[in-house]
């Protein structure tokens, strides 16, 4: 047996029909029953009960609507966060893996942890307009992932370490560092400070970096850096301030 759908039963359309019914019956009674006799009739009792029930149902409908709105907000939140996490974590590596014009040395610079990729012989590749544009797009998405992390960090259930173990690997790329220095003026101050901190700590890593403990140890040190804590604190204060003023 199907479950009863309370949202459908107490929908605005259903409540409107109830109200119209009560108003219609009231008009009919007013035209048919004499005023001095109406208060002694059973119809008066029925109408009083019906009116009271309608008021109760309207209140119940408003409650159901409020619950529905909260449920929808929760669904929207989950969808937004799922998309944000995918954009921050999966999309950048997917873009690199699927690139068709990015140069080999450019691709290698984001995977110094993969010793087999690092050891592949390099071939001479000249820049083309396609490689330039594709590489710039990839790097813009990597930087955007860092910026999104600052924006959504207070919603994420995981700690900072797993994210920055990935972010600092990207920061090892000299191409990304040069790109950011060229376009950092379009980013907010806290984002600039975070990127500069990532690049600073990335330089502490050996190249190549086959040992994952190297990433863990360097990231652990970075997360304890007072500058990192200040960046996160000020960033979250700015986000909270914007939410208040909306």
Image: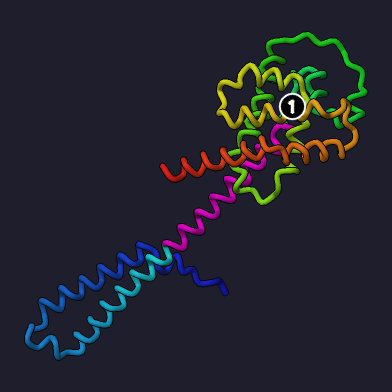
Quarter where residue 14 is shown: bottom left
In the rendered image, which quarter contains the N terminus?
bottom right
Give percent across and percent down for residue 233: 59, 41
Which residue occupies the foreground of this view, 130 or 208?
A: 208
View extreme (front): residue: 226
Magenta span: chief secondary structure:
helix
Name the element at disc 1: helix
Give percent across and percent down for residue 206: 87, 27
The answer to whether 148 appears left or right of 223 in the picture is left
Give percent across and percent down for residue 161: 74, 43
**Residue 221 visible in the picture:** yes
Determine whether 2 is above or below 186 in the image.
below
Q: How many marks?
A: 1
Determine whether 120 is above or below 48 in the image.
above
Residue 75 falls within the magenta-colored stretch: yes
Which residue occupies the foreground of this view, 112 or 216?
A: 216
The answer to whether 224 appears left or right of 216 in the picture is left
Give percent across and percent down for residue 104: 82, 19
Task: State the residue position of label 1.
Answer: 200
In the rendered image, which quarter contains the C terminus?
top left
**Residue 98 visible in the picture:** no
Residue at 67% over, 41% down: 86
Q: Start and end of the magenta stretch?
A: 66-93
Residue at 42% over, 69% down: 9
Quarter where residue 232 is shown: top right
Residue 59 falls within the magenta-colored stretch: no
Q: How would you rate the neighbour count of disc 1 (Cα within 10 Å): few for under 14, some for 14-19, many for 20 or more?
A: some
Residue at 46% over, 63% down: 67
Which residue occupies the foreground of this view, 225 or 150?
A: 225
The answer to whether 76 appears left or right of 26 in the picture is right
Determine whether 38 is above or below 110 in the image.
below
């Amino acid at each position: 047996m199907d479950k009863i759908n309370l949202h459908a039963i107490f929908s605005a359309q259903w409540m409107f029909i109830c109200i119209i019914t009560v108003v219609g019956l009231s008009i009919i009674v007013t035209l048919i029953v004499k005023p001095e006799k109406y208060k002694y009739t059973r119809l008066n009792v029925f109408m009083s009960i019906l009116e009271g029930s309608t008021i109760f149902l309207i209140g119940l409908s408003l409650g159901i609507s409020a619950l529905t709105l909260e449920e929808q907000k929760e669904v929207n939140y989950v969808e937004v966060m799922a998309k944000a996490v995918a954009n921050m974590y999966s999309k950048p590596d997917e873009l690199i893996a699927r690139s068709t014009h990015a140069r080999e040395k450019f691709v290698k610079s984001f995977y110094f942890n993969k010793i087999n990729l690092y050891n592949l012989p390099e071939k001479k590749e000249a820049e083309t307009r396609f490689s330039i544009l594709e590489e710039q797009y990839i790097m813009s998405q990597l930087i955007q992932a860092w910026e999104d992390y600052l924006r959504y960090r207070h919603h994420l259930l995981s700690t900072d370490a797993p994210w920055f173990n990935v972010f600092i690997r990207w920061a090892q790329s000299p191409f990304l560092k040069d790109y950011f220095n060229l376009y950092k003026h379009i980013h907010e101050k806290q984002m600039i400070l975070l990127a500069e901190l990532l690049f600073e700590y990335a330089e502490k890593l050996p190249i190549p970096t086959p040992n994952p403990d190297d990433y863990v140890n360097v990231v652990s040190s970075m997360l304890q850096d007072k500058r990192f804590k200040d960046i996160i604190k000020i960033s979250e204060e700015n986000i909270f301030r914007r939410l208040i003023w909306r």
